[in-house]
Image (cartoon, grey):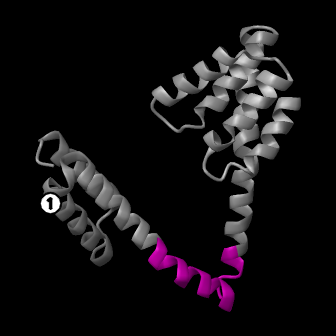
Amino acid sequence: MGFALHLLALSLLAVGGAIAVAPDMHRYLVVQQGWLTDAQFASSIALAQAAPGPNVLFVALLGWNVGWQAQGAVSATLGLAIALGAMLLPSSLLTLAITRWLHRHRDDRAVRAFKQGMAPVVVGLLLATAWILATAQQGPQGGAPLGALAAAVTLLVWRTRVHLLWMLAAGALLGALGWV
């Protein structure tokens, strides 16, 4: 119960993702409570980071390990579910509440100004991400094909109603064929 309450509080502080609060989880689980060893804690993070999927999976493994230390498989499964739920629930509910509030107040001047101000920031971050991904594979001089593809997809998204999944599939096909 203490671990769940601790994760409920940490969930709202995990602005950089769950991994941002890993030091406090270590302090609580290893140093303060002694429920896990340093090796178990580090192994949980390493295994979760090596597995495909979101990096929050390490929280599930920590819950599994705490439950396993307590009583075995049933307790481990319960620990996994409680830890993951406690980490995801508060931030998800906060996001839902803010989204609903913004929708109800979408015509307010401040909300419209915020959205209009954030639009160029979001576009800039997406373009920066596209540039980083395009140049990371082939170097700064050799990223022209991926840069051109990113520009073409940007124009398609902006000017057409082609569904994003079709563009994702086309990009996967081009990558599988070795063209980009």
Name the outermost residue toward the bottom: 109
The percent coordinates of residue 70 (x first, y second) are: 82, 11
Name the outermost residue toward the right: 2
Give the magenta range: 102-121
Q: Name the residue rendered at 81%, 45% in the picture.
A: 9
The percent coordinates of residue 59 (x first, y second) are: 66, 31
- Is residue 112 magenta-colored? yes
Of helix, strand and loop, which mostly describes the magenta segment? helix
The percent coordinates of residue 47 (x first, y second) are: 53, 22
Q: Of residues 128 and 79, which is closer to you in this image?
A: 128
Q: Of residues 40 and 97, which is closer to you in this image?
A: 40
Name the outermost residue toward the top: 72
Q: Of residues 77 and 126, which is closer to you in this image?
A: 126
Q: Residues within 10 Å of mark 1 (few under 14, many from 20)?
A: some
In the figure, is residue 143 to the left or right of 18? left
In the figure, is residue 86 to the left or right of 142? right
Question: Which quadrant of the structure image shows residue 32?
Answer: top right
In the figure, is residue 148 to the left or right of 167? left
Element on which disc 1 rests: helix
Which residue type does callout 1 highlight?
A: Ala
- Residue at label 1? 144
| Quarter of the image where the N terminus is located | top right
